[in-house]
Amino acid sequence: MGEQATFPALDGNGAIPAYIARPTGQPKAAIIVVPEIFGVNEGIRRKCDGWAGLGYLALAPDIFWRFAPGVELDPDEPEQMQEAFGYFQQYDANDGVNDIEAAIHHVRRSEGIAKVGLVGYCLGGRLAYMAAARTDITASVGYYGVMIDQMLGESHAIANPLMLHIAGADHFVGPEAQKAIHEGLGGNRHVTLHDYLGLDHGFAAEMGNRRDAGGAQLADRRTREFFAEHLG
């Protein structure tokens, strides 16, 4: 269903690799799928294929293309997990927002699709929040986004719908950070927060040891309904 492709970087210097899955017939909208720190691996490709099966064009950009293009890692392998943490330390999230902006432009100009959503996981969840605050993305969803509590000063700029799935037992996003997110965003009319008590980071992964089937199914149903409402 999917294919490897590229689209121009925002500054015109380089081409961003991506996995693109297309629906049968005309897409009703597009969804940018932003990976965790493990690259565009099989799980992310499956998520794209799932969105295409629901009638959306799905695009997953290679967020590490500047320094580790094409990397695919398995979070269940300790050595690969450590490799992923190394890439996370190198990564500049501001570059990530620029790449999302480039993806939005590509989808609207080259694919002719006006409504563009975004769903991101972990680091991608942080980028979902940043995109909601800094771009004109139509609607965004973040799963267990990291470091959002440190960026709440940008929340006033959120102008379009944002949904955040918060893992209650997230060992990367602790109770104080979760409390700050609720206090900082709970009253924002554009933001919807969902808590998943007892679930840890990565619970909605498509495969592997981190997945919690019940939590993943609930969160994914809410995401589908959210996009159906805001993207059509």
Image (cartoon, rainbow, N blue to C red):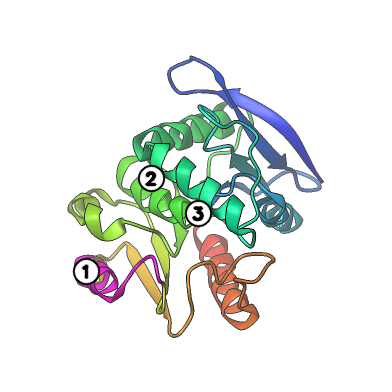
**Tag 1: amino acid:** Ala
What residue appears at the point 68 percent right and 39 percent down from the top-left corner?
A: 19
1 lies left or right of 182: right
What residue appears at the point 34 percent right and 36 percent down from the top-left corner?
A: 94
Query: Who is closer to the viewer here, 112 or 46?
Result: 46
Name the chief secondary structure element in magenta.
helix
Distance from label 1 to label 2 (Cα)?
Answer: 19 Å
Distance from label 1 to label 3 (Cα)?
Answer: 20 Å
Q: What's the magenta region?
A: 171-184
Is any part of residue 91 visible from this angle? Answer: no
Q: Quick check: marks 3 and 2 in contact, CB under 8 Å?
A: yes
Quadrant of the frame with the C terminus: bottom right
Q: Upstream in the sequence, badge 1 or badge 2?
A: 2
Mark 3: secondary structure: strand
135 lies left or right of 38: left
In the picture as drawn, the residue positioned furthest to the top comes out as 13
Dividing the picture into quadrants, the one containing residue 181 is: bottom left
Residue 131: mark? 2
Query: Who is closer to the viewer here, 40 or 12?
Result: 40
* Circle 3 residues within 10 Å: few <14, some 14–19, many ≥20: many
What residue appears at the point 49 percent right and 14 percent down from the top-left corner?
A: 13
**Magenta stretch containing residue 175, yes or no?**
yes
Whole-percent x and y of residue 229? 52, 64
Residue under numbered circle 3: 120
Residue under numbered circle 1: 180
**Tag 2: amino acid:** Ala
**Magenta stretch containing residue 24, yes or no?**
no
Between tags 1 and 2, which lies in front?
1
Residue 96: mark? none
* Circle 1 residues within 10 Å: few <14, some 14–19, many ≥20: some
**Tag 3: amino acid:** Gly
Residue 14's place in the image compared with 149, above or below, is above
